[in-house]
Each structure stands twice: as structure tokens, then as C-alpha cells.
Amino acid sequence: MAGFAFSKECKIVGVLDVLTTAASTSRAGYVVDTLGFNGCCFIFHNGTGVATAVKSFAVARSNVAASSTSLTDGQDILGTLQTLTATTDDDKIYYCDIAVLDDTERYLLLTCTKSTANGDESCIAILYNGSESPVTHGTGSGTSGGSGAVSGEFFTVTTEGTA
């Protein structure tokens, strides 16, 4: 009996690339186009920061994507700001789940703000409650294609053997 297939029912999009070295520069993620979905969950992975580091992230929305990393007249979504501190929040995963989306403001953008000395971070978005399935995952191109192409495998059996 086939059940719910997460990778077939949700769209995965890269938002923030993993940094190869710790960076202190604030950065915008890649725009996420929510057209055809009723929810979007950002999953933010915070790296190890230095003792004085302070980092925050928030999600804005708009009806126009100006580029792959900016919105035209984007406004923060109330309550999405999350502030992380070094040592307390090192190497933790945070999420921001926006369960009700509006097609008139279909583009979302996560922005990570950092103090002068910070560790690295990465983020993906998972779009869910889509109007159609199966879905196509982020392609890493276009105005809202995410930071890189998403690929993976789907299995219908769990037979043991060589991976």
C-alpha cells in the first residue's frame, strides 16, 4: 500500500548556500516562489559562531521578485524575526513555518543579518500543500530557482542490500 511520499508532495528549494568559511556579512537568500502552494517552511541551520556573535533572520514577502535575491517593495512578515546568539544557539536548526500563503504576495525572501564576527549558516525552504503533485524541486536557476539544483532519490521498497 502506497502512502504519503514527502519528496513527491513537497517542493524543496535552496535558500542560502553553505559557506565554506565563517563570514560576517549579512546576506539575502534566494527568492522562493510559492505559487501553487499553501505553506512554506524555512529550515535554517546555524553554524558555530564566535563568543560575541549575534545573528538573526526574518522572512519578507512581495508580489514582485526584482531578482533572484531581492524583492520589490518586500515587507517583513510579522513574527518571523528570530535572533540567535553565539554559544547558546551554535549548531542548532531553526524553522520558520508559514502555513497560510496568499497568491497576491507569492514571493518570499529570507534575510540573514549578522554582527561583525559570525559563523556560517545555510537554509532550505520546503513548500507544501501544493495544488498539484508530483512537484519539481528547485532548479537553481531563474528568479526563484533557489541556490542550487535539488536532487535525490525516491524509494518504494526497503529491501536490504548494498547501498
Image (spheres, rainbow, N blue to C red):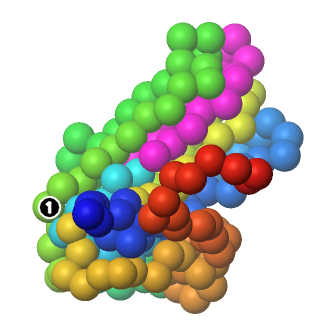
Q: Position of residue 145 (x, y in %)?
A: 55, 80
Left or right: 69 with respect to 94? right
Q: Quadrant of residue 61?
A: bottom left
> Could you tell me which residue is drawn at 34 percent across and 53 percent down?
41
Left or right: 140 with respect to 7? right
Residue 108 included in the magenta stretch of the image: no
Q: Residues within 10 Å of mark 1 (few under 14, many from 20)?
A: few
Residue ID for mark 1: 100
**Magenta-highlighted residues:** 43-60
* Quarter that holds the N terminus: bottom left
Q: Which amino acid type is marked by label 1?
A: Val
Q: Is residue 106 something one can see in this rendering? A: no
| Extreme residue in the right direction | 21
Residue 53 included in the magenta stretch of the image: yes
Q: Is residue 143 something one can see in this rendering? A: yes
> Could you tell me which residue is drawn at 23 percent across and 41 percent down?
79
Position of residue 153 relative to residue 19, above or below, is below
Between residues 47 and 74, which one lies in front from this camera angle? 47
Position of residue 33 relative to residue 121, above or below, is below
Q: Quadrant of residue 49?
A: top right
Q: Position of residue 143 (x, y in %)?
A: 53, 85
Q: Secondary structure at mark 1?
A: loop
Left or right: 92 with respect to 35? right
Between residues 161 and 56, which one lies in front from this camera angle? 161
Position of residue 25 relative to residue 72, above or below, is above
Q: Main secondary structure of the magenta part?
A: strand
Between residues 43 and 70, which one lies in front from this camera angle? 43
Left or right: 65 with respect to 20? left
> Could you tell me which residue is drawn at 63 percent across and 70 percent down?
151
> Could you tell me which residue is drawn at 25 percent across and 84 percent down?
132
Q: Position of residue 31 (x, y in %)?
A: 48, 71
